[in-house]
Amino acid sequence: MSQDDDPVETREWLDALESVIQYEGVERAEYLLGKLSDRASRAGTPMPYAITTPFRNTIHHTDEARMPGDMFMERRIRSLVRWNALVMVLRANMKPGDLGGHISTFSSAATLYDIGFNYFFHGGDEKREADLVYFQGHASPGIYARSYLERRFDEEHLDHYRQDVGGEGNGLSSYPHPWLMPDYWQFPTVSMGLGPIQAIYQAHIMKYLHGRELIEKADRKVWCFLGDGECDEPESLGAIGLAGRENLDNLIFVVNCNLQRLDGPVRGNGKIIQELEGIFRGAGWNVLKVVWGRNWDSLFEKDTNGVMQDVMDQACDGDLQNFKSQGAAYTRKHFFGQSPELQELAKDLTDEDISQLNRGGHDPFKVYAAYHQAVHHKGQPTVILAHTIKGYGFGKAGEAQNTAHQLKKLDKETLKAFRDRFGVPVNDDELENLPYYRPALDSPEMEYMQKRRRELGGRMPSRRRDAQPLKIPELKAFDKLLEGSGDREMSTTMAYVRMLTIMVKDKRVGQRVVPIVPDEARTFGMEGLFRQMAIYTSEGQQYTPQDRDQIMYYREDKKGQILQEGINEAGAMSAWMAAATSYSNHDYPLIPFYIFYSMFGYQRVGDLCWAAGDMRARGFLLGGTSGRTTLNGEGLQHQDGHSLVLHNVVPNCLTYDPAFSYEVAVIIQDGMRRMYEENQNVHYYITLLNENYHHPAMPKGAEEGIIQGMYQLESINVSGKAKTKTPRVQLLGSGAILNEVRAAAELLKDDFKVGSDVWSVTSFGELARNGNHIARWNRLHPDEKPKTSWVHDSLAKAQGPVVASTDYIRLQADQIRSFVPAAYHVLGTDGFGRSDTREQLRAFFEVDRYHVVVAALNALAEEGEVDKKQVLDAMRRYNIDRNKPNPAFS
């Protein structure tokens, strides 16, 4: 019904509601409305669906917490921050090289940050750790400018903005990058969407640690600043349901709703604030809209019939941008001119008055009230939707303009107008030089600024580099894995699970071990840990699990140690990142192990993997069911032939492809030593297999080779003949294919009288890094004795050509080609995966034992060591069709 057939009755209902609100409060009114809704639903009455509220502030102006500070002092400081941020970017763009930089994002968010710095961002003290703040990446110039006023940076630093290399140690990174500024930035955020999902899981891990009584959460908050356009990234909103379900009241999102993306409006034909309100409220968040500044309050009081509110509700974001960019006369005509009632409302407003009708995100009082409510709200995460103007302060040059994001230069008149608007004490004749401005240390502004931060515990942003070293279990603690599997067959995944079981029992580090899985624990044979360690859940297990009568039942607990993050690789990766940086964020190192289908690792969350390297994460990523031919039956989408290559592009990620249980043990134990005893900023990607086979005991002295990347596993000699008297080949293998290589060595000996040395290559990636490092040193030191790589030293005295075989694309083994001191031949699994048995798949991709034999014989034939007829004989003997289509293209 859109027509009111009984206005008198309607008025009576509304008067009754207003009476309840006035005399009994809004909570009573909410209760009554809920009861009415329930009763109407029981009667079958269709209810109007509404998950959004009118387009106005959530907090009524009479209910606002009052900002206690000096408004005028804070505006002066905020103006200086604005000025120095602007000058820093303008000066950078006067230099050759087009360094770029962004000024419009911070201009829209300056008040949002300023209120946080002055009243809410706790820097930590002897009683509590600091708040964790995810700064919007494009706003970094404003954060630097504030640090400049605080004397953390000087002019030389600001003049080397975006000059990480040429800055001679004084450069300021373009965006938040802990790798480049390890004492300053905590989180890399500028790849849009990564900040929000990281913040959610950071809050999740904080509650996890608190629930397990490992840290005291106190009143710490995780703040995340993001843009409205950024919310279109799946990562931005994809995990907000978790925050709602887990009641993460330690989490606050501040969405800078300046209504613009890089190219144009976020929702020109819609209303992004209303859209986000509905999405967040539906996910269980506390939603606070900060739409209008205090200059609108009196107009709302006069708008007794709701005419102005109706026009606000109907205006789309494209209209709102025009109201700001086109000026007061346009707003008077196209907003207030829509009805006689609105015209009457605005009749006493001058054009200057209309210009001063500010948006809520630029009003410090409104922002303070929202932040105050957010930090005191219990039981829900909070999102603050702050209505702002992109390019605020730049007038016609950029204010609410579609081109605002690309604004990097201003003409002199615009610069003068900006100076005058914000009262910056710089003379006209100084403007050509674009001077910074910083008051004396004992000035009222600086004393006020420093006092505010002292009361909040100290500087922000700030990052802890290291934590107290842990005492890691020695390798002998894993003797059962070093001794091999005996008569039993096992997989390297099972070896990992056994190692995990040993570690969690260790009195020194056991409670720090964090197993993380995205719903595939049973696939990886980890269900035995359910009862032992329990799965973490914020509310405990409030139901009886279906398998409660079984030994390995699905046990959830508030103090559970396992993080079971559901079918959600991005979420599980974000949880791992939070755990992997706990040493810095909580001064409590965790040892996280995130195991997942290797195909769905970097390929799905590569941006997060890169960010993990940037933020100096420490921990283990484990690619389960790895290898193109080892995960039989699953087919093209599941079979991984490239994850090692992908993870290896992250400079501080060490990649390993172990074949045996002792290799797994050595790699993980050494990794823990490096990361948690020596505080090295590295993390590991280790592939694991689901194929069962016998595991030998560790050869004596193999540890160093396992860590470096390769070692000689065995030597296969032809009976009755010396090594030098028979053809010989060097066979390299890794992971699942190492056993095929070992079998090929036996075939070469028995069928063709060819000897071989079999090498287990645990890391082609580490071998390549070592080789490239040595090659660089030699190139830059031509006057000194050349150094040699681990590959060269290992194979220097070996006889014959070298053949490498892996379950990955050829590029994996090809990384070491230039360091091999002999002819080098590579077999790999290039192409799309298939579903079949392992034997069929390895034959198809030409990496089985028979193809290894053919490759070895062909390599020997090329060197004249055997007759080419033997190559043909081998193909006939093993039924290899040389006219078969190339699997790389088929």
Image (cartoon, rainbow, N blue to C red):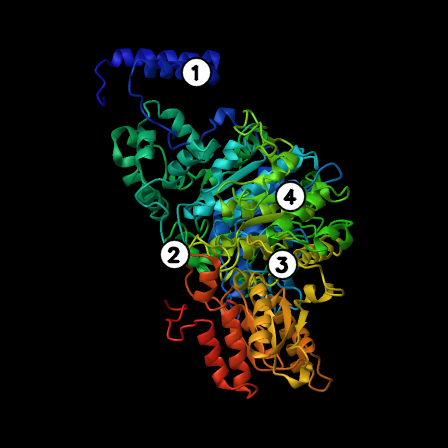
- Number of numbered discs overlaid on the protein picture: 4
Q: Report the disc number at residue 179.
A: 3
Closer mark to the observer between disc 1 and disc 3: 3
Q: Amino acid at mark 1?
A: Ala
Left or right, 467 with respect to 492, comes to: right
Which residue is depicted at the point 30% across and 43% down? 269
Query: Residue at label 1?
Result: 29
Q: Residues within 10 Å of mark 4 (few under 14, many from 20)?
A: many
Q: Amino acid at mark 4?
A: Val
- Answer above or below: position of 822 versus 691: below
Distance from the alpha carbon under mark 4 to that under mark 2: 47 Å
> Visible in this render: residue 466?
yes
On-image quarter of the N terminus: top left
Q: Report the disc number at residue 403.
A: 2
Distance from the alpha carbon under mark 1 to that under mark 4: 46 Å
Mark earlier in primary sequence (2, 1): 1
**The residue tagged with tag 4: helix, strand or loop?**
strand
